[in-house]
Amino acid sequence: MGAVNHTYAVRATVMGPDAKSLRVDYGPEFAGRMLDQWAYLNGVEIDFSRPGKPTDNAYIESFNGRLRAECLNASWFLSLADARERIEDWRCHYNEDRPHMALGGLTPRAFANQAAIARELA
């Protein structure tokens, strides 16, 4: 039961505090009452992809691979608090400081600054 709660805590940390929907597959970790209860208590809607269709959610499959390779497999968590801190640090780096090909190789922060300047000039 502790591992299940830890899984949801990790995903909740990565999602951020304002997430309203969680897109998941039909894996056993997502098909239980604990996830339903967690989602209900946190006001999060669970959106299941179609069985056998990982391409329905290619973005999250790619993200999960990066999270697993760059953070989860690269870290030895000493406690749940340590896991939350390290995952939050990785999430902030991923969302703010890491270059993304979808943004033309810019970091999200640089892309946002560029967009703000363009709006001011328009």
Image (spheres, rainbow, N blue to C red):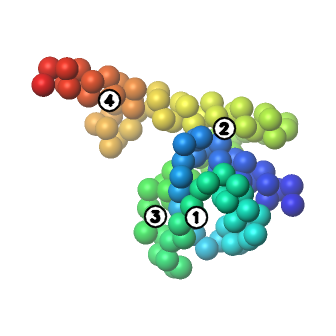
Q: Nearer the viewer, residue 7 or 67?
A: 7
Q: Secondary structure at mark 2?
A: helix
Q: Mark 4 sits on what residue? A: 111
First-in-chain label (1 vs 2): 1
Q: Quadrant of residue 8?
A: bottom right
Real-space Cα separation, disc 4 to disc 3, in angstroms: 24 Å
Instruction: Judge whether 93 appears above or below 21 on screen.
Output: above
| Quarter of the rendering containing residue 59 | bottom left
Q: Earlier in the sequence, mark 4 or mark 3?
A: 3
Where is mark 1, residue-wise? 46
The mark that comes first in sequence, 3 or 1, is 1
Is label 4 in a helix, a strand or a loop? helix
> In the image, residue 62 lies at what x, y percent?
48, 54
The mark closer to the camera, 1 or 4, is 1
Front-most of residues 120 and 77:
120
For label 1, the crowd category at 10 Å Cα-Cα, with few meaning under 14, some 14 to 19 and many 20 or more, is some
Q: Which mark is residue 87?
A: 2
3D distance between C-alphas at marks 1 and 4: 30 Å
Q: Which residue is mark 3?
A: 57
Q: Quadrant of the C terminus?
A: top left
| Marked residue nearer the N-terminal end (3 or 2) | 3
Q: Residue at x 62, y 54 (%)?
A: 43
Residue at 69% from the left image edge and 40% from the top image edge: 74
* Residue 40, x across and y down, in percent: 67, 60
| Residue 29 point in image, percent of width and height | 71, 66
